[in-house]
Amino acid sequence: MALAKPPSSADSAEIRLVRILPPTHDKDIPVSCEIEYVGLGEVVNSASIEHLDWQEIDDTPQHSGPLSKRYEHAFAALSYTWGDPNDTRTILVDGYPVLVRSNLEAALRRLRRKVPIRQGLRIWIDAVCINQEDISERNREVKHMRAIYKNACDVVVWLGKDEDNSRKAMDSPDNFGQGAWRGLGQLLKRSYWDRMRIIQELSMGNPRTPILCGGSIVSWSELYNAVYVFGSKHMDALFGNVEREYARAGDKSYSGLNRNKVIHFWAEQSVQAGHARPQYMPLLDLGRKAFATNERDRVYSLLGLLLADVTSLISPDYDQGVNHAFHQFATSWIKPRRDLEILEHCNGSQTGLPSWVPDWTNRDHYRLFSGRSCYKASPGELTVVEFQSQELDLVVKGAHVGTIDGLGVGFGHDYDTVQSSGGMEQSRCRANGYGSYDELRDAVWRALVGDRTPQGRAAPSGYKSLLDCPILPDCNDIPHASSRGFKTFASIMTQNRNLQIAGKPLSDFFPQINGPIPDEAQDALERIFRLHRFRKLATTVVGHLGLVPMDTQQGDQVYALQGCNVPMVLRRMTGSRHKIIGGAYLHGFMEDKYT
């Protein structure tokens, strides 16, 4: 929408705020609000206001009392998703009719009944408080987003109207009953959780942040505890209950819980509150997986959460192309930080960009571990950053650790098999790079889990019980066989059972008859589900074993690069120039031990 009056100065930190007016006796009259202008400096202490009660409502028409002085220098900030651009409603802004999307109108209609709003608390709403048709204003406001949400007395989350069993999930987040499990799954699949800008918005909240869905409300901590604390203790029960309720309802839309996303949001909130160390790689993962109306926002909307020495080099510019934004972000990351950790976000399928510049529009890219970096394959720190050819080439140093020989069949999203580059390509050598047969067996199970737990810790010896798991396809009657981890394991093993490892088929390392799945293997199977998406097993010419990106080909090289935490698969182009294919797990080469 266009706003008639811009902020008083293009360089000022003045923002617009919305005052939502109370309802009238006539329910057919549109929601009415007023625009006010304040300087961010005037509301700098807004976040210090004590916890607000968003449960209480006031349905009396017009103001039932004077505005509270408590909110004179305070405001809240709304976090929501815009919704369908073709589904609009009319509201009144300063008395003039304005079209907004229906999801925002529903939020305003609900919020105007809340006591803090009735008492005069103003609210910041991006669709109303930023002139979306003025690119120069949008460029400026991107830099203010962190300050706006940080200084708000509350970040108010609006998930949308009641639907899809949402009330059952919202009304009992700590005591789920019949129907609530599917409701939880549907609640966490709402488009809100995929919106790019909520990463920064929700990160500026706190455990008490109110989450509204229709007429229901829970705190952020209640929702987090429902999906994380319970799931951590009863992983199979959590996913099993949700899947069963979807199946009973004949609903085939279930594709996961978005649980990891909620966990990362919570972790980033702790970082912004100063309670935890920053974890920038998971933050960039969130940006990659989100949906962005403008692809430039995949980097621009995260600037308020990143290091100042990186963001100071970036000037948001919506007039420039998407590739310009991504290239500027990559160079601005590498130059001051002097590390190449960001290369793990690269993949060989991207087009129009140097291969060392991540393409953040590729949502089907996964790092070896979705949390903090838990490997240290770098042969030393990056002491010099050198770019060539007008910053199109990045000059790096590293140690050659392998040449790809054999390649298995890769795994995609949902236990299915994705064949790439002609399917399986057998090893042309029989070498055992680990010495003895026992060490080779050890390498097999460690490579399958990336030698890490789902929490990123070193894999315990109990994970060796993976080698006791049956790999026959007709094993649905085995306890735990319905878990997503075992389904992934069974799919990978069935498709790769003939892959040659040191002259032996992969199936030789596993039992040939059906049997129980060891309890000790449950965590390991969950790790396999997370690790193997869009990767495939591989061997090197000297007999080492690992996991590589789907686009890897025989003859590709594996290097441990200075400043990069994981080995990288590279493809030689011309002379000393190489193309990045992506990060790899190569067993025995994940720790810093090179020269």
Image (cartoon, rainbow, N blue to C red):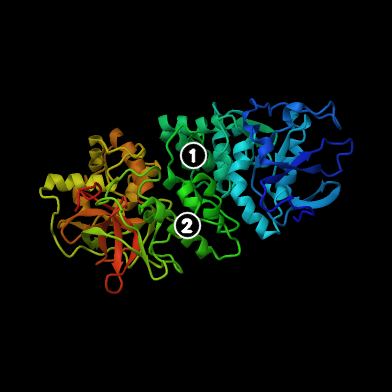
Q: Position of residue 116 (x, y in %)?
A: 73, 30
Residue 537 horizontal side relative to residue 392, left or right: left
Dot 2 corresponds to which residue? 329
Horizontal placement of 158 versus 350: left or right?
A: right
Q: Tell which of 119 and 313 is nearer to you.
A: 313
Q: How many marks?
A: 2
Outermost residue to the right: 25
Relative to residue 217, is residue 417 depicted above or below? below
Callout 1 amino acid: Glu
Q: Earlier in the sequence, mark 1 or mark 2?
A: 1
Q: Secondary structure at mark 2?
A: helix
Instruction: State the image quarter where residue 501 is shown.
Output: bottom left
Q: Position of residue 422 (x, y in %)?
A: 32, 68
Q: Amino acid at mark 2?
A: Phe
Q: Quadrant of residue 395?
A: bottom left
Report the front residue among 122 and 238: 122
Of residue 529 and residue 280, the one placed in the foreground of this image is: 280
- Front of the two marks 1 and 2: 2
**Residue that mark 1 sits on:** 268
Instruction: Using a 10 Å C-alpha cutoff, classify the residue at mark 1 as few (fewer than 14 neighbours), some (14 to 19) or many (20 or more).
Output: many
In the image, taking residue 552 as reference, residue 122 lies left or right, namely right
